[in-house]
Image (tube, rainbow, N blue to C red):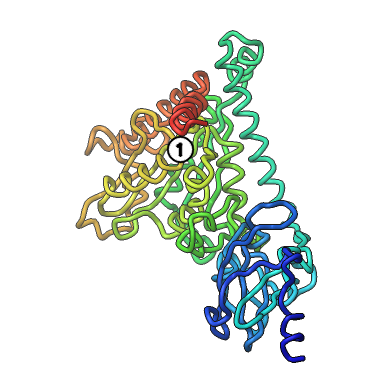
Amino acid sequence: MKRRSMYMLLPSNKDNSYKYVGFSSEIPIGKSKSITIKDTASHKNINIAIFNISGRFYAIFGSCIHKGGPLSEGFLNGDIVTCPWHGWKYSVKNGKSPHKGGDSINSYKVKVVNGKLYVNSFPSHRGKRVYKPHTAYSELESSVNNYLIQKSNVTTTYNTTTTSASFDKLLHELNNSKIRVLGISTTNANDEIAPRKSTSESALQFALDYTKNKLNTETILIKLRELEIKHCEGYYSKNAKACIFPCSISEMDKEDQMIQIYEKMILWADIVLIATPIRWGSSSSLYYKMIQRMNCVQNQIITNNKFLIRDKVAAFIITGGQDNVQHVAGELMTFWSQLGFVFGKFPFVGWTRGWYSEDTENNYKEMMTRTNVINNKDLKNKAKDSATNIFYQDIIKMMVSALEMSLLVKRHLYDENVINKYNKIINSNSGT
Ligand code: FES
């Protein structure tokens, strides 16, 4: 009788939906394991996470329904597992979300027979994606996808025939449209306590006004200190694929205004002009806060072969009381080149007064009155309103160069050609 009941517990040979997956002793209490079984219906391999809760075993689909995070590596609290990538939660007993409106995931029955674990390859509960990101996030995601599709269509047309109507149309549009310059001021000067003139922001404003009025561009100025930008939480360090675009922090927190930067930088701007003060030899802390949130833009190249920055130019304004322009310029150019920006001639301008210039209250006045002819009082007085200011002359040179480079890359579909050729080589090498 005892032997018979034991036999009844064993998954039947005919019932091939139960798959042997290992010994129960391999998963101690409170632990989990990732296994792969073949789905009986589809014959595809499926990844399963098995959990041991107080000696009872439960199985759910192993990859998080959000972006595929490994649930067997999640944090287990009671019967709730938290995905290690972005924190989605599931009950391991039935795959359901512990909170209303959350996504659920497939769960599977588990049998233990003579210390052996069997998992049924048919889900006992089917998971469902119900969570919807907030509107601004979804709109950015779909706009960027559409933008990339448009870009790849232009490439195809251009490569088929350089005189196609579509390419002519593009050139026509380009010749009739204004170059768009996005200025990003990264100074953290606190206007609420005591408004003061920031050297980096004043120089940026001059550059934007000049290109708008004299070089016929459209301009937008974003001041980082006026935006609510959350810190990067380092998802990339967990797994390269956990760093998604648009950033998961923007998805989870609709107050986060980094979306404005992504949108203007990827979809609107032709030229991005960054202005930073020098703080102890480096860029401003707000600048770093912003660029760490841009890892997801650069990371798309590595994880998805997706190039979000197309035909765009970057340029930089660096000002400080004392020194280190070259170090800051090197850091800025390294990062923005890795995002996929190109540079014109003279891609940065720098202004400092030297190591012993502790009279920082004079920085702004000194910058505004710096002329080619030092000690010429007349010129000093005129400098702030005219092109006799040597620093402003440099800014004009940089902006003219950036504009010319922008026209060059757009007219020649520079990025599209590079990306297209690169993909062809990679695909032919991999035999696809
Ligand atoms: S929460 Fe699991 S992949 Fe994002």
Residue 237 in view? yes
Residue 255, position as x, y percentages in the image: 66, 62
Q: Nearer the viewer, residue 219 or 15?
A: 15
Front-lying residue, 287 or 218: 287
Quarter of the figure with the N terminus: bottom right
Q: Report the residue that reaches farthest toward the left.
A: 356
State the image quarter where residue 134 is shown. bottom right
Q: How many numbered markers are drawn?
A: 1
Q: For mark 1, does the 10 Å Cα neighbourhood hold few (<14), some (14 to 19), or many (20 or more) residues?
A: some
Q: Is residue 360 above or below residue 268?
A: below
Q: Position of residue 247 (x, y in %)?
A: 58, 55
Can you give x and y, in whole percent of width and height, for residue 33 in the image? 55, 72
Residue 170 horizontal side relative to residue 301, left or right? right
Tell me what residue is drawn at x 63 percent, y 69 percent: 20
What residue is drawn where x is 25% and y is 52%?
323
Of residue 330 and residue 131, the one placed in the foreground of this image is 131
Tell me which residue sits at (62%, 83%) in the image: 114
| Left or right of residue 120: residue 262 | left
- The answer to whether residue 314 is above or below residue 77 is above
Closer to the camera in the image, 315 or 238: 238
Q: Is mark 1 within 8 Å of ligand 1?
A: no
Furthest residue in direction bottom, as rendered: 2
Estimate the x, y position of residue 254 in percent, counting from the top left: 68, 60
Choose top left, top right, bottom left or bottom right for residue 192: bottom right
Location of residue 155 with respect to 4 vertically, above or below: above
> Residue at left 30%, top 60%?
280
At label 1, which amino acid type do we have?
Gly
User: Can residue 382 be spotted in the picture?
Assistant: no
Residue under label 1: 340
Q: Secondary structure at mark 1?
A: loop
Q: Give the answer, above or below, for where 137 lies relative to 317.
A: below
Left/right of residue 136 with respect to residue 383 in the rendered view: right
